[in-house]
Amino acid sequence: MSDTVKVIYGNKTYELPLVIGTEGEKAIDISRMRTETGLITLDYGYANTGSCYSSITFMDGEKGILRYRGIPVEQLAESSTFIETAYLLINGQLPNRAQLNRFSVLLNDHSLMHEDMRSFYEKYPRASHPMGILSSMVNALRSFYPELQSTEEEINITMTRLLSKVRTMAAMSYKISRGHKVVYPRPDLTYCANFLNMMFDTPVKPYRLDDELVEALNVFWILHADHEQNCSTSAVRVVGSGRVNLYAAISAGIAALWGPLHGGANQAVIEMLTHIKNDGGNIKPYIARARDKNDPFRLMGFGHRVYKTYDPRAKIMKEMCHRILDKLNLSDPLLDIAMELEAVALKDEFFIENNLYPNVDFYSGIALRAMGIPTNMFTVMFAIGRLPGWIAQWKESMDDPNWKLCRPRQIYTGQTKMDYIPLDER
Ligand code: ACO
């Protein structure tokens, strides 16, 4: 096969390089296209645009494949822990025992939050959304902790600090929002166990850790840990490309994740399912609305920019919902509605034609509800899980000698040149 692509424009033919990834993905390298042809490309939503080379995550949306550093997400969900997966994403390989121990010690050492940050939390209006608070607080970390970004060891400390503190900050925001005493991280607990304990332990009712719930949280976070160049990861890379500090870049990622078309969908799904339940539980009008081109309603938790088949994470998440509910001897009417919606949608012409399958957010809220996580914290749970991916992608961009300031162009459609008219002549 030719390693160039010919572009015919006017009476000239230009040859642009063809680049091929390790999994056979092909792209036309247009870096020199404007210089050579005077043309730019136009691509709404960057749906056909590769923004970088990356060796972190591979996904094949047609086949439903997701791998972190080459390892299938199914295997990681089955056998790994969130912390080990975070190490894998950030460092490129699974840690040996000594490396994993060192990483755990660092996470523990950096798990406390500066006490002065508590006053920020306490001044936030009670009804604030936790994602807004988290985004601001992560940005504020830069004022409390110097950014260590020169040596490899310093970068590791900054990254570990973020991973550890964001978990503490998330649990703390929940406690403060409820007017409860803050629970500190404990050195004897693992990352996930610590989070559940910080969320649910109270002085009058000690929290009893359940191994299966801890395991479920590990899997939940592993499934969210990275997803190549999605909206929030691209936000981290774009904001980071201006060489801003890591905290600010991650804060931008959190803000991007908040939207209901992206990570905020996990909250939106539960709100939609609750609405259907309160409306009598009949799903038919909602399927009809989703199909109606004149109705902006969308079935939340369905569809994906890249997956044109069942999202592999949704499959694991659905099984997890059943496992947790069985274990806790609970039933959730929202799960019944979700499964009914899925069954109807998967046979419906509109959903088949548009390749609309459940995505990771469709079942994740039901799993989180069973763990006792309140609905407005769902997207925060997503953010904690995505943190290793954001960090790994930020680090990869900073280490890439070709990474440039991200600055797309446009096709201008406004008024052509006209003269200024003085105020009293208008
Ligand atoms: N319900 C009904 N129709 C849908 C849905 C849906 N959930 N998703 C897409 N469609 C329709 C669109 O209306 C569009 O129809 P049209 O071509 O007639 O206009 C067609 O399917 C293609 O959809 P696009 O919006 O062009 O596809 P895109 O790749 O831009 O959208 C997205 C992907 C934003 C995820 C979309 O499927 C959606 O809005 N889903 C619901 C929100 C959601 O679950 N988001 C979470 C995604 S996973 C994540 O980010 C973590």
Image (cartoon, rainbow, N blue to C red):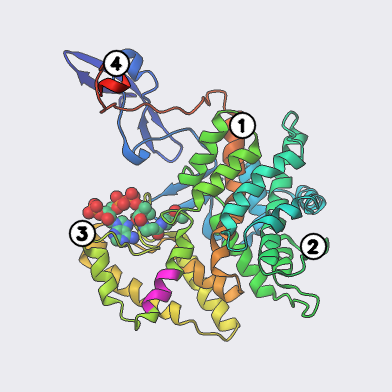
Residue indicated by mark 4: 38
- Tell me the distance, in whole angstroms, between the alpha carbons under discs 4 and 2: 59 Å
Contact (CB < 8 A) between labels 3 and 4? no
Frontmost residue, 121 versus 108:
121
Number of labels in the image equals: 4
Looking at the image, residue 97 sits to the left or right of residue 250; the answer is right
Tell me the chief SS of the magenta region.
helix
| Residue ranking furthest to the front | 424
Q: Which of disc 2 and disc 4 is earlier in sequence?
A: 4
Residue indicated by mark 1: 244
Amino acid residing under circle 3: Asn
- Say which element carries label 4: loop
- Say which element carries label 3: loop
- Tell me the distance, in whole angstroms, between the alpha carbons under discs 1 and 3: 42 Å
Q: Which of disc 3 and disc 2 is earlier in sequence?
A: 2
Frontmost residue, 40 versus 413:
413
Of the two numbered discs 4 and 1 in the rendering, the one whose residue sits closer to the viewer: 1
Amino acid residing under circle 4: Gly
Residue indicated by mark 2: 184
Residue indicated by mark 3: 294
